[in-house]
Amino acid sequence: MTHGRRTDVSPSQQGGGDWRDSAARYALLPLRIFLGVTFVYAGLDKLTDSAFMKDGGAGSVGDMMRAVRDSSAIPALVDLALKNPPGFGYAIALGELAVGVGVLLGLLTRLAALGGALISLSLWLTVSWASDPYYYGNDLPYMFCWVPLVLAGAPFWSLDAVIGNRRRRGAY
């Protein structure tokens, strides 16, 4: 008979572990909070800005899209938005709000993070594409910030974890 530590469970599952184990377990939590709060704020900011949700005028989504059309990587994407700028503005704002709430609550986190990455990618390819050098634009780093949450989800302090634990226990 051999005595020793089991190798099929982590030290935290065995009741041991140190601060590094805890730090590794919760490493994505600050990123999740930052991105969630930022996207909720961005969505609410657009929804409450009467100038943004207009076809034209200072600060409108329509004027912004017309201004970036010729410098974007995918002008056809901007042309699609220009067919109905207020509708596009509402779609982006509601998408940001849904992504932010989903990530903050940890509900369908991977799907919400994928939505956040796609929103950031589309904004990078349209609005901030002309930033020179490219790293002055903020949408590209946001896109890559979403990738760890797409891959890992929200295994702690999330509704996903609660639902997963209930399923494993057979509570559903």
Image (spheres, rainbow, N blue to C red):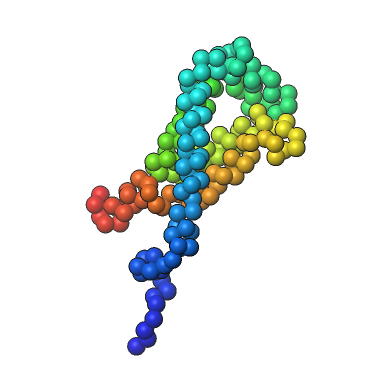
Residue 95 showing in the rendered view = no
Residue at left 62%, top 36%? 139
Residue 169 occupies quadrant: bottom left
**Image coordinates for residue 15, horizontal then vertical, percent:** 35, 68
Residue at left 69%, top 32%? 129
**Image coordinates for residue 19, horizontal then vertical, percent:** 45, 62
Q: Does residue 1 appear left or right of residue 87 in this picture?
A: left
Residue 35 showing in the rendered view = yes
Residue projecting furthest to the right: 132
**Image coordinates for residue 123, horizontal then vertical, percent:** 61, 31
Q: Nearer the viewer, residue 44 or 102?
A: 44
**Image coordinates for residue 128, horizontal then vertical, percent:** 67, 31
**117 is higher (above) or lower (below) than 97:** below
Residue at left 42%, top 40%? 104
Q: Nearer the viewer, residue 8 or 28?
A: 28
Residue projecting furthest to the front: 19
Residue at left 47%, top 38%? 36
